[in-house]
Image (tube, grey):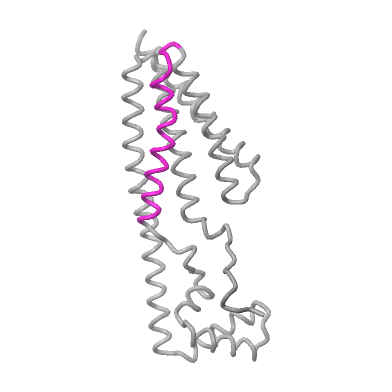
Amino acid sequence: MIGPHMAAERHRIERIGWLRAAVLGANDGIVSTGSLIAGVAASQADKPAVLLTGIAALVAGAMSMAAGEYVSVSSQSDTEQADLAVEQRELAEQPEAERHELAALYVARGVEPELALKVADQMTAHDAIGAHARDELGISDGAAARPLQAALTSALTFSAGAAAPLLAALAAPAPVLLPTVALSSVFCLIVLGWLGARAGGAPAARAVLRVAFWGVLSMGVTAGIGRLFGTGVQS
């Protein structure tokens, strides 16, 4: 028997909003900053130039991630609010049609028609717009768009990710700066992939291989371009 004393069950899907933004931000911070540092270092630039590149990448990338997430998630939120306004108006103007529409959704999920109407009546009496938002539009509190949360999460996690290759570049002697940044970036990507998989309940090996592969590819291509153009400029 279900009672009010029973604790609500928690699911990993409720983390999807902030988890996606966090993993994307940190991954982009490591990959983009590490790749830029690798490219500039491979061009035989001196260490101050490499560090300046890393700092610029961190600041510009964090701002870009925040702005991009805020704009995109705000667009999603605007669409959700517009759909909810339509549902609110339809509930006020044609409640019987909305009642049958909600019941039809339950019938499609296997509920008997007579019982579906009773469920629709009870759900409407409890929270009409909430029932239509969840069951008709697929909008729930856990998955609702939160622009500010996404923007802040992306900016902070990008900065944290970008700090890893930047600190490695700062600490490494000039002769081994490139391999130090590359190895530390790959290590951070592996840790990030593992943490993201753990938080989301996904297989860790797949997540680790995915982020490591794209990180190595990005840094390798950028370093190659830096080496090519650096040689061309010097000659």
> Looking at the image, how many numbered discs can be counted on the residues?
0
> Where residue 76 sits in the image (x, y, percent)?
41, 61
Q: Main secondary structure of the magenta part?
A: helix
Whether residue 170 appears in magenta in the rendering, the answer is yes
Answer whether residue 163 is magenta in the image.
Answer: yes
Which residue appears at 38% of the width and 55% of the height?
Answer: 149
Q: Is residue 37 above or below residue 142?
A: above
The front one of 91 and 189 is 189
Q: Is residue 228 visible?
A: no
Question: In the visual, does 142 lie left or right of 208?
Answer: left
Please state the horizontal and vertical placement of residue 84, each as a whole percent of the image: 41, 74
Residue 232, picture quadrant: top left
**In this view of the protein, which residue sits in the foreground, 147 or 219?**
147
Residue 7 can be seen in this image = yes
Q: Quadrant of the C terminus?
A: top left
Left or right placement of residue 170 versus residue 202 in this view? left
Quadrant where the N terminus is found in the figure: bottom right
Residue 36 place in picture, x, y as percent: 40, 27
Task: Tell me if residue 58 comes above or below residue 16 in the rendering.
Answer: above
Q: Which of the 4 image quadrants contains residue 162?
A: top left
Name the spot of residue 164 as percent of width and height, x first: 44, 30
Q: Residue at x 45, y 25 (%)?
A: 222
Q: Start and end of the magenta stretch?
A: 148-175
Residue farthest top in this picture: 235
Image quadrant where residue 79 sits: bottom left
Name the residue located 34 percent from the left edge and 54 percent from the top edge.
71
Q: Is residue 86 above or below residue 213?
A: below
